Amino acid sequence: MFTRGTLIYVAQRIVLIGFTVLVVSSVVFLGIHRLPGDALFSEKLRGQQYQVLLHHYGLDQPLYVQYRDFVVGVVTRGDLGESLVNRGLKITPLVLRETAVSAEVGALALIFTIGLGMVFGIFAAVRQNTWLDYVLTTTSVIGYSVPNFVIAAFLILLFGVWLQNLTQGAFFYQLGAWTGGLGQLWLPAFALGFPYASIVARLTRASMLEVIRQDYIRTARAKGLRETVIMVRHALRNALIPVITILGPLVIGIITGSVVIENFFGIPGLGKEFAQSILNRDYAIVIGVFTMYAALVGLANLLVDLAYVVIDPRIRY
Amino acid sequence: MATAAVAIVRPLELEQASLWSDAWRRLRRNRLALVASIYLVLLVVVALVALVYTPFRMSAVGVAATYSPPSAAHLLGADELGRDILSRLMVGAQVSLIVGVGTQLLVLAVGVPIGLAAGYYKGWFDSVVSFVINVFYGVPDILVAMIMVFLLGPSLTNIIIAIVVTRWMDMARLVRGQALSIREREFVEAARASGARPLKMLFGHILPNALGPIIVQATFGIPSAILFEAFLSFLGVGVQPPTPSWGSMANEGVQAIQYAPHMVIAPSIALSLTLMAFNFLGDGLRDALDPRSRR
């Protein structure tokens, strides 16, 4: 499955990802630093004090020096600088901590997406043109039409408000401060994953329908294999290949969707930080978080490409 | 001479008309698409009516008790400042439709020529275009749009520009693919042999034959742009107050979800129904214009 060629391929890709991240963050860095004013400027600091702070952040240097320092800092020390609003707050550890939180939510959302999507898709295909198929197909159109924050709002109404009143608080979704427990995690993850689960379901259904009409499935039936074995061992594996192709856009979708969901639920992850620092005009954090996102998207795409190799033995790098 | 020209042109016109009328017949038979179209026509009417009449002024504060639930005077209740939610919903429909249709018109203007040229001429231009498209697919669109709106300033025009910048590739890629296959057909060869100029070639011969998929793609692009704007407004970097957007209304509703659920329900349903209607219409158009792709 994985050969030396794979290793070389992965190494090449990682170099390419590093290069892309550098280019993307440079564009954002230069774009933002062209703007007049900054977070310091808005505090109406005067004279000496303002000059000291400007110097502290290197903002009194010409742009190319600032840019050089930024790139050197990122490349040699992985240092993304310091927050402009919360003085002394180092961005790199902050971003890494938040990435861990976002990754937790995102991973659970991905499990929901693929798990639900495949189960729905398989059942719809196996029971083609029955009421089950129609219900699942219609649900999936609704699923990808409804925005994730609308799903989240209705789930909160259901589990956080109505069910709380109904069961006198015996069973409800805990709103409020984020503790990171699974009890708080499942709802945001579900809201984040559901729209994409619909897309996976549609795709799984379509490709299953195509695969189960093929000769080797008939052969398997003729051999007298049980239907479940045929579906899971023979059909599903081949039906998965087109599904894998949308994994890349799917992961990017979950990453961008998490910006909305994290702000909705007050999850202290990358997405919340990104929106907050844009509203706070904390340019340094905006650049840092965006750099992290670019790296994450690159790595996610690499992992998806490696998943091809696992599913489809014909593919080698 | 003139009569000869007419004689050649007329049968072609008849053929084309029958393709489109076939599609129209298939679309009318699709009940979901029909219901969706009726909903969308009503939505456009509501948005137009909101230009001259809303039950209350959308920005008028305190026309009802704050957070008051739906009543006879205020059919959808009032928000945290005592503004009439129905009036704000109607104006929000304008914002959504302008963003949805506006972005798709711009996406057409950008994506179609680029895709046509890349697919028809191939070679280095196609390589460059394909590379740029892949780069754009690799960056998370909402994040880029947020930064752009932040850099340019949050106005409706800038939001539309930001969405177009992060979404033009879908159309360009589709048109490129169409052009790549259409350029190999005999009638293109015939046109080339008879000395058609490049512009006539691209827009007179290739484009009309790719029109079906383009219309379908543009229809699916509208809800995705509306959703995009709702996301931006939900995060506070979209349309600025006092102009209402369904996204920002939902955001205000979420803050009050425990004691005034009607605030989040109204814009959520409006948004979901609209997105669903466009998606159903897109599905219907796809089945009608391209019978081979029927599921």
Image (tube, coloured by chain):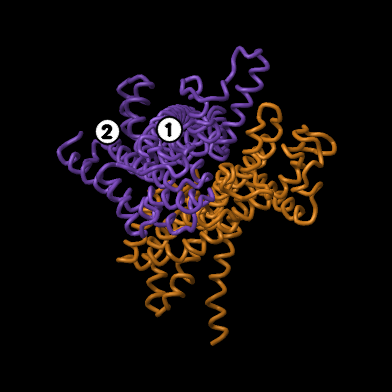
Query: Considering depth in this image, is A159 or A288 the residue closer to the camera?
Result: A288
SS category of the residue bearing label 2: helix
Q: Amino acid at mark 2?
A: Val
Q: Name chain A's colour.
A: purple
Nearer the observer, A237 or A311? A311
Chain for colour orange? B
Instruction: Please state the horizontal and vertical placement of residue B115, each as a whole percent of the image.
Output: 42, 62
Marked residue chain, label 1: A
Residue type for callout 1: Ser
- On the rendered image, what quadrant is the N terminus of chain B found in? bottom right
- Report which quarter residue B254 is drawn in: top right
Q: Quadrant of residue A148?
A: top right
Foreground pick, B185 / A233: A233
Task: For mark 1, give the secondary structure.
Answer: helix
Judge whether A171 appears above or below A154 on screen: above
| First of labels 1, 2 by sequence position | 1
Q: Chain of mark 2?
A: A
> What residue lies at 58% left-to-right and 62% top-to-bottom?
B18
**Location of mark 1 (residue):** A102
Say which residue label 2 marks.
A310
Residue A220 left/right relative to A182: left
